Image (spheres, rainbow, N blue to C red):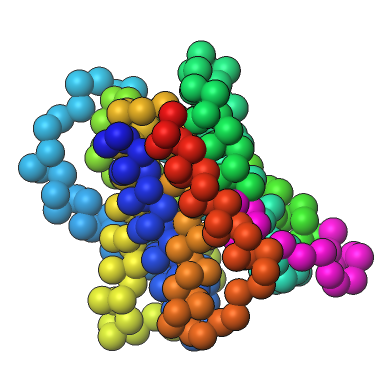
Amino acid sequence: MIGPLLALGSALTWGVADFAGGTLSRRLPSAAVVGVSQACSLVLLLVVLPFVPAASDWGWAGWSVLAGAAGSLALVCFYRALAFGTVGVVSPISALAVSIPVVAGLLAGEQPHGVQLAGILVAFAGAVLASGPELRGEQHVKQQAVWFALAAAAGFGVTMLAIARGAASSTIFTMVGMRTTSVMGFAVAAVLVRSVGGVKASDLPKLALLGLGDVAANALLGFASTLDLLSITAVLSALYPVVTVGLAAVLLRERLKPVQLAGVALAFAGVGLIAAG
């Protein structure tokens, strides 16, 4: 059960990080929040790297670059989608990302028990519903949002799969390679636009904590994937919308829609089925 517990820890950490990142993005450009927080997390990773055993091979290298590039492009598409549509349209579609590592795990020969397979489907449905799906808005706006959200889902799914594959060689080195790739991309963008989005020195502690939370979530997924089936750990780690909407309800007094409450219930039911299997 260690693998699933780590995957749930990943969902918890991702959910908290998404909530914090969304709060910071209300007064800072989203790209600046992502870029600077990831740069901070890279610094933290480089500090602990000398104390980590060296990787036995370079199998993590290519996967880490793919994870960094796909994750960065996915974030750009995700925020672009939010510019065209509502969260209720974009978030449920982006939650489809988990289907990529799940299918990859099954095609690789993973065979979850029948009860676990049912839990995967139930938890997946819960994650989508907890995001508060809606289909309102003008047709052309909705189409733009859907296409960008689908691109984000593909990017996030590839990122999750690449993290899992790279972690088979070294989780920490995969994180370092991933962050190096994404930070280089954001640094080039900052040079081209000649701005860091108005980030001040006083913002750095919060952004550093945000970056630490994000990389911790990625690392927990990587470790979890080495201890249990990817088709299970990926779904459990993708339950972060449940945490995000829960924090919004408790801290911001946001009222959950009935469909979101149903999603939270399904998510817990899916976790129970996976554990029972």
Residue that sits furthest to the front in the current view: 276
Q: Horizontal placement of 259 versus 268: left or right?
A: right
Q: Nearer the viewer, residue 171 or 266?
A: 266
Question: Quick check: is 130 in the magenta stretch?
Answer: yes
Q: What is the magenta range?
A: 126-143
Where residue 195 sits: x, y (%)? 47, 76
Residue that sits furthest to the top in the current view: 109
Tell me, yes or no, if residue 222 can be seen here.
no
Tell me, yes or no, if residue 117 can be seen here.
yes
Where residue 46 sits: x, y (%)? 19, 50
Q: Residue at x 43, y 82 (%)?
A: 251
Residue that sits furthest to the right in the current view: 139
Q: Horizontal placement of 124 versus 143: left or right?
A: left
Q: Nearer the viewer, residue 118 or 228?
A: 118
Which image quarter: residue 50? top left
Q: Residue at x 33, y 51 (%)?
A: 9
Q: Quadrant of the N terminus?
A: top left
Which image quarter: residue 75? bottom right
Question: Quick check: is 103 in the magenta stretch?
Answer: no
Q: How many marks?
A: 0
Where residue 15 sits: x, y (%)? 44, 62
Q: Residue at x 51, y 14 (%)?
A: 109
Whether residue 188 is situated above or below residue 88 in the rendered picture? above
Q: Nearer the viewer, residue 149 or 188?
A: 149
Which image quarter: residue 140? bottom right
Q: Residue at x 66, y 72 (%)?
A: 257
Where residue 20 sits: x, y (%)? 41, 73
Q: Quadrant of the C terminus?
A: top left
